[in-house]
């Protein structure tokens, strides 16, 4: 099914390209039965070229979006998400069963739309309200939409639920329930990570770009270390991955994380959070994480090199943790995708990107990383008085001046009574 | 496999009798299909006997339930958790294939690992600040609990990732598809079970009323549908559940809406049921009931006063909300039951379990309750939580959601802001 959606070269090279993915076709198992590692493959240079070509284009596209700004990056994420969902929805579809169920596909997109409304509504709540403060009418409209957002999304979901039950057809119960469950799993996987990516973006493009870069570095480094040194297979699920590639990539990722954090952290465009949905230039107070601290180097280094002290941004220590996760745990996302493809006997999730497969193939490790970065950021990086800010915001927006004074008085009373007996 | 788990304690456990009991569920028994294919309850000869069994276990369930309501919020939460564990266990076992399972030792354990992680996450979020408020007596314990609450999301995420990695490392060559299927199934079960139980617990701490009213309405809807179908049922309602009839459905809807209105009045008068609980204590509750539960008097029109001795009627504003809840309970909540029926037909199972004689498993009883619990929570958050902000409310929220240090910080900054405004205005 996805072999038809092609926009590039003839059949045989793509078969060779697909060997870059995780399935090994039977033709090239050697006589002694051992698996074929990347080091021994004759066509590897050609496929490396195709892969590099599409990697370059993807890089250019991402760089353009980053230059344009937060809103455009979100738009890119949404587009990638739509493609991923489309690929995954089509994956376990059985055309024979589907012909008996007209408009069943529409149900998937209904749930997709509901999920998008819910997730982006929650994440962009603050930003949305701050964008429309100029116009009183819009402000009221948006505020009430936000207030009833949960109810609206719930009713849309229930409508889909009722629609699903009313469309159950006698001989296709099992197929329909399977598709329903599959739809839920896809939407959860796709939306959790894209929601967290968007949340990260509005905290500062750094928190989106840096992890994505680390995964890309990890991938590329693993590929090259495996290309030149790969001998020992890593895991049965992905026979082309090797221990040499894994360890080399881990070291490269850790070093890259330390240095990239320094480089990226010096740009205000990347480190400033965005409080509303505007697209213009960004000015903000420098977050303490990105203010350089100076450490004087020990004597022996300053003897050999001209530097006396080194400027380290506090964020670089956080970056080391992110690098550690990216090298050790994020590859499990790739293993999961490989295992999944083996379980359901599919070669790739799609064929949109020549040399790489579909969007989901590229995003599998990114997804695990995005969730981790969001949780790490919320737990360890976010300043202490985050929720205090939120409450102050609420108080100023919703209470009148006299009410604020009354609140102040009562809070003072309660605090002076104290909690500890 | 379910027939082996004989958990029934009643004397009537011969296979034929249990078959007749199962007929009370949604699968049509081929032995009873007559020539014209009529399976409605009105025509079933053994209905009186099975009604007695069903009524007996219903009575016990209601009795146990009432006792727990009397004992309080924490005990109700404990009951919800116990029910949840049983439901998860039933559902985990449902699509298990023992042949494959024998080749995967320790795979069952993974399910319970995810269950534990989900429980930690969900209840941690809902009860976090209440937990902190409970341990304010001891400084060390307070610090410990506060930091656990602060890093709660990170802890749960680490546990989940550990489970994820464990899953990947246990993938065995010929069992990939089965394992992935089980993994997806586990996620779906946990989502379904925990969403509704977390919303139920959240409702409980807002006031037992918001848990008891929806649950009672579902029970009433069920019982009324059964009785109306018993006596008047003629026209089948939906192909998925051949025993349900339009007469039962409509009769139950009317009954549910009327009883929603009346029950809300009854329940709204009790402080035990309407007061929210701010911490995890178990004692008596005192609170200001809030505008929703204060009776408003409406003068009855003249002609009613002729026939009845009442001149005016007092209605609690919450009764109008109860009408909406009753409407949902009668029209949409049955779809939860249809979903469960369809699911059982799709996977060719008669019941989710057989813990409750006459009713099937716990999931069979809870299918409509689940849909209702989510609705009740969302309705409460969107329409009942007061529309306008008031000082009391914000103060409550501050005390509930912020730690002591954060409250002090808020106090200081609020003071600064107010001073700035006074200076600015003068």
Image (cartoon, helix red, strand yellow):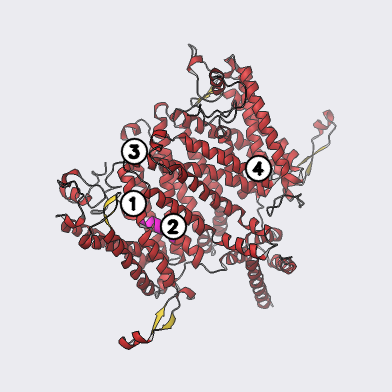
Q: Are marks 2 and 1 on the same chain?
A: yes
- Picture layout, residue B415 above or below residue A295: above
Q: Tell me the SS state at disc 1.
A: helix
- State the residue position of label 1: A335
- Which of A12/A142 is in front? A12
Query: Which region shows up in magenta?
Result: A365-372
Within-10-Å neighbours for mark 1: few <14, some 14–19, many 20+: many
Can you name the residue that lies furthest to the right here?
Answer: B309
Q: Which residue is mark 4?
A: B211
Which residue is drawn at the image coordinates 69% and 44% (left, top)?
B208
Does residue A272 appear to the left or right of B42 in the view shown?
left
Measure how far apart labels 1 and 4 are at the Cα level: 43 Å
* Distance CA(mark 1)–CA(mark 3): 23 Å
- Residue A371's tag is 2
- Disc 1, disc 3: CB below 8 Å? no
Q: CA distance from mark 3 to mark 2?
A: 28 Å
Q: Tell which subunit mark 3 falls on.
A: A
Question: In the image, residue A49 lies at what x, y percent?
Answer: 19, 59
Q: CA distance from mark 2 to mark 1?
A: 17 Å
Report whether mark 1 lies on the same chain as mark 4.
no
Q: Disc 3 on helix, strand or loop? A: loop
Residue B274 higher or lower than A72, as above or below: above
In depth, the one of B230 and A364 nearer the eye is: A364
Percent across and percent down for residue B113 are 49, 48
Which label lies toward us, 1 or 4?
1
Q: Which residue is mark 3?
A: A93
Q: Earlier in the sequence, mark 3 or mark 2?
A: 3
């Amino acid at each position: 099914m996805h072999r038809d959606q092609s926009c590039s070269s003839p059949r045989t090279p793509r078969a060779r390209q697909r060997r870059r993915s995780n399935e090994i076709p039977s033709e090239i198992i050697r006589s002694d039965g051992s698996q074929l590692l990347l080091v021994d493959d004759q066509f590897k240079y050609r496929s490396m070229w195709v892969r590099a070509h599409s990697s370059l284009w993807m890089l250019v596209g991402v760089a353009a979006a980053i230059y344009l700004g937060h809103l455009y990056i979100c738009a890119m994420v949404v587009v990638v998400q739509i493609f991923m969902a489309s690929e995954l929805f089509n994956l376990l579809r059985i055309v024979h069963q589907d012909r008996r169920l007209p408009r069943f596909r529409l149900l998937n997109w209904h749930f997709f739309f509901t999920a998008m409304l819910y997730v982006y509504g929650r994440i962009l709540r603050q930003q949305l309200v701050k964008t429309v403060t100029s116009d009183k009418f819009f402000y009221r409209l948006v505020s009430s939409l936000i207030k009833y957002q949960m109810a609206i999304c719930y009713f849309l979901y229930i409508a889909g639920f009722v629609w699903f039950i009313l469309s159950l057809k006698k001989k296709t119960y099992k197929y329909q329930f399977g598709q329903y469950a599959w739809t839920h799993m896809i939407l959860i996987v796709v939306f959790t990570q894209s929601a967290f990516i968007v949340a990260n973006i509005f905290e500062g493009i750094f928190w989106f770009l840096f992890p994505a870069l680390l995964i890309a570095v990890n991938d590329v480094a693993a590929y090259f270390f495996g290309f030149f040194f790969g001998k020992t297979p890593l895991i049965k699920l992905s026979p082309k991955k090797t221990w040499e590639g894994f360890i080399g990539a881990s070291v490269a990722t850790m070093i890259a994380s330390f240095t990239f954090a320094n480089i990226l952290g010096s740009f205000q465009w990347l480190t400033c959070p965005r409080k509303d949905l505007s697209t213009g230039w960004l000015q903000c107070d420098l977050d303490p994480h990105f203010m350089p601290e100076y450490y004087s180097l020990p004597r022996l280094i300053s003897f050999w090199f001209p530097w006396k002290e080194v400027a380290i941004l506090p964020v670089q220590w956080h970056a080391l943790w992110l690098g550690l996760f990216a090298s050790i745990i994020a590859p499990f996302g790739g293993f999961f995708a490989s295992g999944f493809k083996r379980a359901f006997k599919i070669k790739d999730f799609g064929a949109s990107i020549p040399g790489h497969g579909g969007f989901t193939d590229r995003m599998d490790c990114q997804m695990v990383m995005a969730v981790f970065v969001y949780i790490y950021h919320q737990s360890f990086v976010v300043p202490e008085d985050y929720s205090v800010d939120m409450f102050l915001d609420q108080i100023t927006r919703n209470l009148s001046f006299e009410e604020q004074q009354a609140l102040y008085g009562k809070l003072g009373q309660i605090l002076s009574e104290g909690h500890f007996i | 496999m379910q027939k082996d788990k004989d958990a029934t304690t009643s004397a009537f456990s011969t296979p034929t009798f249990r078959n007749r009991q199962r007929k009370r569920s949604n699968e049509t028994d081929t032995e009873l299909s007559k020539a014209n294919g009529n399976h409605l309850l009105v025509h079933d000869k053994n209905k009186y006997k099975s009604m007695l069994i069903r009524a007996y276990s219903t009575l016990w369930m209601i009795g146990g339930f009432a006792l727990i309501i009397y004992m309080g919020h924490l005990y109700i939460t404990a009951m919800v958790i116990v029910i949840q564990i049983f439901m998860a266990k039933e559902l985990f076992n449902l699509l298990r294939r023992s042949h494959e399972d024998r080749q995967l030792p320790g795979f069952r354990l993974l399910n319970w690992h995810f269950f534990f992680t989900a429980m930690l996450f969900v209840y941690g979020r809902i009860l976090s600040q209440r937990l902190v408020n409970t341990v304010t007596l001891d400084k060390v314990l307070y610090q410990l609990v506060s930091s656990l609450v602060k890093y709660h999301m990170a802890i749960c995420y680490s546990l989940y990732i550990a489970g994820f990695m464990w899953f990947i490392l246990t993938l065995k060559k010929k069992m990939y598809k089965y394992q992935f299927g089980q993994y997806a199934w586990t996620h779906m079960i946990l989502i379904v079970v925990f969403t509704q139980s977390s919303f139920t617990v959240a409702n409980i701490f807002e006031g037992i009323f918001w848990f008891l009213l929806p649950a009672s309405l579902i029970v009433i809807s069920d019982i009324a549908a059964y009785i109306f179908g018993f006596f008047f049922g003629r026209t089948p309602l939906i192909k998925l559940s051949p025993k349900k009839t339009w007469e039962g459905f409509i009769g139950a809807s009317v009954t549910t809406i009327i009883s929603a209105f009346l029950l809300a009045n009854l329940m709204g008068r009790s402080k035990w049921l309407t007061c929210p609980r701010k911490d995890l204590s178990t004692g008596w509750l005192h609170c200001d009931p809030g505008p929703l539960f204060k009776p408003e008097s409406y003068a009855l029109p003249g002609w009613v006063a002729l026939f009845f001795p009442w001149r005016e009627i007092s209605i609690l504003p919450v009764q109008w909300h109860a009408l909406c809840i009753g409407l949902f309970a009668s029209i949409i909540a049955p779809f939860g039951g249809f979903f469960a029926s369809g699911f059982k037909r799709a996977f060719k199972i008669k019941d989710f379990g057989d813990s409750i004689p006459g009713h099937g498993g716990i999931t069979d009883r809870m299918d409509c309750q689940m849909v209702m619990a989510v609705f009740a929570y969302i309705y409460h958050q969107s329409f009942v939580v007061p529309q306008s902000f008031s000082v009391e409310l914000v103060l409550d929220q501050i005390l509930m959601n912020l730690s002591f240090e954060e409250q002090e910080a808020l106090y200081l900054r609020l003071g600064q802001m107010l001073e700035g405004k006074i200076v600015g205005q003068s």
